Image (tube, rainbow, N blue to C red):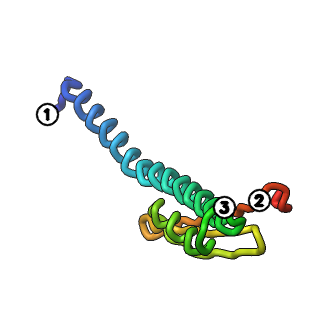
Amino acid sequence: MRLRSDRGAGSILGVTILGGVLAAMALLLPLYIGMSLRQSVVGAADAAALAAADVAVGILPGYPCEVAAVVASANRTTLARCDVDGLIVTVSTKRQFLGQTLRATATAGPPRSGLN
């Protein structure tokens, strides 16, 4: 028996295209979220370095690395490293995502302190 009709072939094609789109979304969505989280880790490192530099300069009270840890925690990251060299502070932050560690480093200090 031979079929002479293509009836229903469009439904199969539609389901196949829909499956391909869903598979692409399943692969790309974690990548997009990871890139977004990476930028938040970078922002957290910048904020922590600036806050710690404010403490090192004397604008805010406290200890630079303790303030950096509080700011990093408020941005849902962990302070991985904090180095104070005079008035210049370098911090590293990290965050876990899907078994990967996202890291960022930032340096801050007063104007004309040799950072440029």
- The residue drawn where x is 47% and y is 49% is 32
Determine whether the residue tagged by mark 3 lies in a helix, strand or loop. loop
Mark 2 falls on what kind of element? loop
Label number found at residue 110: 2
Identify which residue, 10 or 3, lies in the foreground: 10
Assess disc 1: are there few (<14), some (14-19) or many (≥20) residues with their C-alpha within 10 Å of its C-alpha.
few
The residue indicated by pointer 3 is 59
Element at label 1: loop
Pointer 2 or 1: first along the chain: 1
Say which residue label 1 marks. 1
Identify the residue at image location x=59%, y=58%. Answer: 47
Marks 1/3: CA–CA distance: 88 Å
Q: Amino acid at mark 3?
A: Ile
Q: Amino acid at mark 1?
A: Met
Report the front residue among 47 and 54: 54
Q: Earlier in the sequence, mark 1 or mark 3?
A: 1
Residue 104's image quarter? Answer: bottom right
Residue 43, how many percent across, how many down?
A: 57, 55
